[in-house]
Image (cartoon, coloured by chain):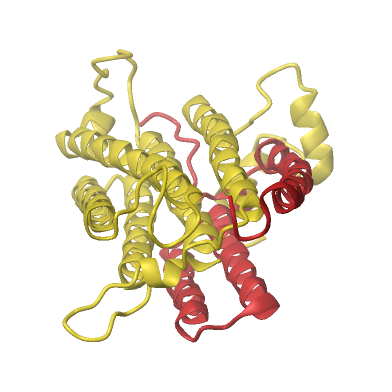
Chain colours: A yellow, B red
Amino acid sequence: MAPSDTTATEAQAVGLAPGLPGLAADWSSDQRAFKNVPWGKAMMWIFLLSDTFIFSCFLISYMTVRMSTTVPWPLPSEVFALSFGGEPIPLILIAIMTFILITSSGTMVLAVNYGYRMDKKKTAILLLVTAVLGASFVGMQAFEWTKLIVEEGVRPWGNPTGASQFGATFFMITGFHGFHVSVGVIFLVLVARKVWRGDYDTGKRGFFTSRKGNYEIVETMGLYWHFVDLVWVFIFAFFYLW
Amino acid sequence: MAHVEGQQHPLGIYIKVWGLLFVLSSFSYAVDYYHLEGYLRWGLILLFMFLKAGFIIAVFMHIKWERLALSYAILLPPVVLLVFIGIMTIESNHTFLTRGIFFGVGGA
């Protein structure tokens, strides 16, 4: 076993079986099924699972309207092209947004890591960097929406370049994703503030649930943030590239 | 210090996956940039998409290190979406054909 598998070694130390027998034992233990997983993290995973189904419904309805329309679909490569003085570069803004989101996922994962090392300063800074990158993503999305609405005349009920369902699915899917990013940015700032103040070192009680927090919250926050990145991977592939 | 049941791993693996995600994203973008068409385009888009999604879930979201009780509870339910996709494919083909018959292709 690799020395990095801290949780696996920990699990064996307290007598939990690995593999499929472990799966059966965990679920039939008449106790909590998710051993070694704090409740907050398990709940975040359940929420993300439900969110998976919501985004899947959006993407599947997009597939349905795109497959069933008899009018040609607008070419995303041209619709989302942007020119910096010269020839328009296809999808360039979307590519930049993709790289920004991946960068923010990287800073998030580092924040989680430094959180468990109790490195308050680095964790808070990395969380704030993640939040700034997320905010710039939303900013670029606002720019993209404005350009599409004002310059290209795309509306939820129609557009000049092709099938009228284009606008409806575009605004619904990217809007819902952008909303997720915005909520993530707010929570990143809140968690960064608590880390900076040292709430997770002293076990200060939160204002809303009045529970004591610890650095596990940074990991739970990270799960949400990576999920937002994950959804973008699918939107990028199916909406912008397809 | 209270007992923390968190995931802690060496930084190296995160940095490697981070770099890999950048490379895969560039590849996806290249698919569009070089105007690949047809099954090659769709195949490559799906390949890079699933690789990226897989690395994010496995490493960044730590599923690789979780116990199977959690991994299966999270990863198996979305499989039923394949049925949903199948049903909606049939449905949209039907709608497309009906529109073709009643409005004429290119109309509506």
Task: Name the residue rendered at 72%, 43% in the picture.
Answer: B88
Residue A4 shows in this picture: no
Q: In the depicted view, which residue is nearer to us: B97 or A118?
A: B97
Q: Where is residue B54 in the image (x, y as percent from the top left)?
A: 60, 59
Quadrant in the picture for the C terminus of chain A: bottom right
Q: In which quarter of the image is the N terminus of chain A?
A: bottom right
The residue lying toward the viewer, choosing from A95 and A13, is: A95
How many dots with numbers? 0
- Left or right: A240 as drawn, with respect to B77: left
User: Which is more toward the observer, A157 or B86?
Assistant: A157
Residue in the image at 38% along x and 62% along y? A102
A145 in relation to A87, above or below: above
Return the x and y of residue A210 as percentages of the image width and height. 30, 13
Quadrant housing residue B18: bottom left
Query: x and y percent of residue B13 in the render?
Result: 49, 67
Is residue B69 something one can see in this rendering?
Answer: yes
Residue placed most toward the observer, A39 or B80 = B80
Eyeballing the image, is A153 above or below A206? below
Q: Where is residue A198 in the image (x, y as percent from the top left)?
A: 19, 34
Give me the residue at 16% from left, 82% from top: A85
